Amino acid sequence: MRRGEVWLVDFAPQVGTEITKQRPAVIVSVNGIAAFPTRLVVPFRERKPFHSTIAYYAEMQPSPTNGLTKASTADCVQTKSLDQQRFIRKLGELSPAELQSVMDGVALCLGL
């Protein structure tokens, strides 16, 4: 499990407005940083037209490389640290430009 890989992840159970269900997510944590079997991930949601107006959303088009099956948005405000037991299967990998788009959204959410 490495930075930039897209995995199907189980986000249930949810609390409040947290993202839920099984959905794709990209690993954004630096390789080798965690002493425990956890990874920081950014989940994807189905892209909606208004998403282009939200600065911390990174829009992605499906491709054979990234493994997404529909136009999606990386919801960077929902960045989470999850145990590897929640990871179901690898779907693909983001290109460097796609990963940078997600990281720009994460940086905005963190005020960096």
Image: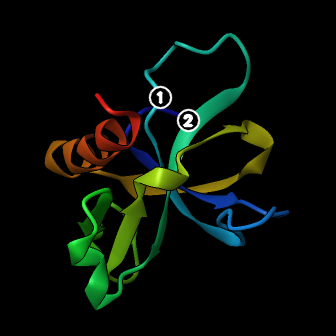
Query: In the drawing, what numbered circle is on residue 44?
Result: none
For marks 1 and 2, the one nearer the N-term is 1
Answer with the quarter of the image where residue 104 lies: top left
Q: Is residue 15 above or below residue 31?
A: below
Task: Give how far across and how far down residue 67 sits, in percent.
Answer: 39, 66
Q: Quadrant of the C terminus?
A: top left
Pointer 2 residue: 40
Q: Is residue 77 left or right of residue 65?
A: right
Q: Residue furthest bottom?
A: 49
Which residue shows up at 30% across the image and 69% down it?
Answer: 64
Q: Amino acid at mark 2?
A: Leu
Q: Quarter-wise, where is residue 57 in the image? A: bottom left
Q: CA distance from mark 1 to mark 2?
A: 5 Å
Q: Secondary structure at mark 2?
A: strand
- Using residue 109 as the reference point, say whether residue 104 is left or right of it: left
Q: Position of residue 93 (x, y in %)?
A: 35, 50
Crowdedness near tag 1: few (<14), some (14–19) or many (≥20) residues, C-alpha within 10 Å: some
For residue 29, the mark is 1
Q: Amino acid at mark 1?
A: Ser
Q: Are marks 1 and 2 in contact (CB under 8 Å)?
A: yes
As drawn, 24 above or below 32: below
**Image location (x, y in percent) of residue 11:** 72, 60
Residue 26: in sight, yes or no? yes
Q: Secondary structure at mark 1?
A: loop
* Percent coordinates x, y for residue 41 in the rendering: 53, 44
Residue 61 visible? The answer is: no
Q: Residues within 10 Å of mark 2 (few under 14, many from 20)?
A: some
